[in-house]
Amino acid sequence: MYYINLLNHQGVFPSDQDLASHPTTKEIVNLFASNQNEFSNKFANAFVKVSQLSVLIGNQGEIRKSCFAPSNRQSNNGVCGRRGGGNCSKHINYCKIIINLTVISNNFSFLV
């Protein structure tokens, strides 16, 4: 239903709706909207891959209030651009680079 909603211009978030029109993702939106089994199979395979990732324990990782910066570099309240300052634009650009690298391939190998 999610992908059908995107094709009907009923995405909840603009970033979701953009999936239906972006050149690197619209093909897969159409595929998943027309074939729920295809989505289910791809999702199951991706879920298995994620479940095989090593989990960080003890002091190997960190819990962040903001995903944009390591905890020791966050502003006072954990939100960039508010009390304590911060440069959100560089973090947003960094996230855009990561997203572009993730979806640059038309074969969507992260779902295979």
Image (spheres, rainbow, N blue to C red):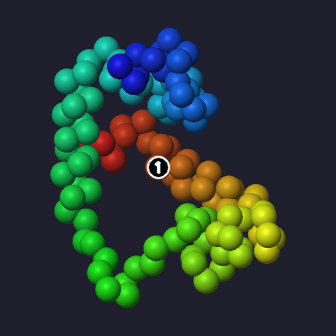
Which residue is found at the position 57% from the left and 76% from the top? 70
Which residue is found at the position 22% from the left and 55% from the top? 49
Which residue is found at the position 18% from the left and 51% from the top? 48
| Quarter that holds the C terminus | top left
Q: Residue furthest top?
A: 8
Where residue 68 appears, as percent x and y from the top left, is 61, 65
Q: Is residue 71 above or below residue 88?
A: below
Where residue 10 appears, as percent x and y from the top left, is 53, 18
| Quarter that holds the N terminus | top left
User: Is residue 22 among the parts visible in the rendering?
Assistant: no
Q: How many marks?
A: 1
31 and 80: which one is in front? 80
- What is the quadrant of residue 35 in the picture? top left
- What is the quadrant of residue 83 in the picture? bottom right
45 and 82: which one is in front? 82
Locate residue 87 relative to residue 35 in the image: left or right: right
Q: Is residue 99 above or below residue 90?
A: above
The kind of secondary structure element at disc 1 is helix
Residue beneath disc 1: 102
Residue type, numbered disc 1: Thr
Locate residue 85 relative to residue 65 in the image: left or right: right
Q: Is residue 2 above or below residue 110?
A: above
- What is the quadrant of residue 60 in the picture? bottom left
24 and 33: which one is in front? 33
Q: Is residue 102 above or below residue 88?
A: above
Where residue 93 appears, as percent x and y from the top left, is 68, 56
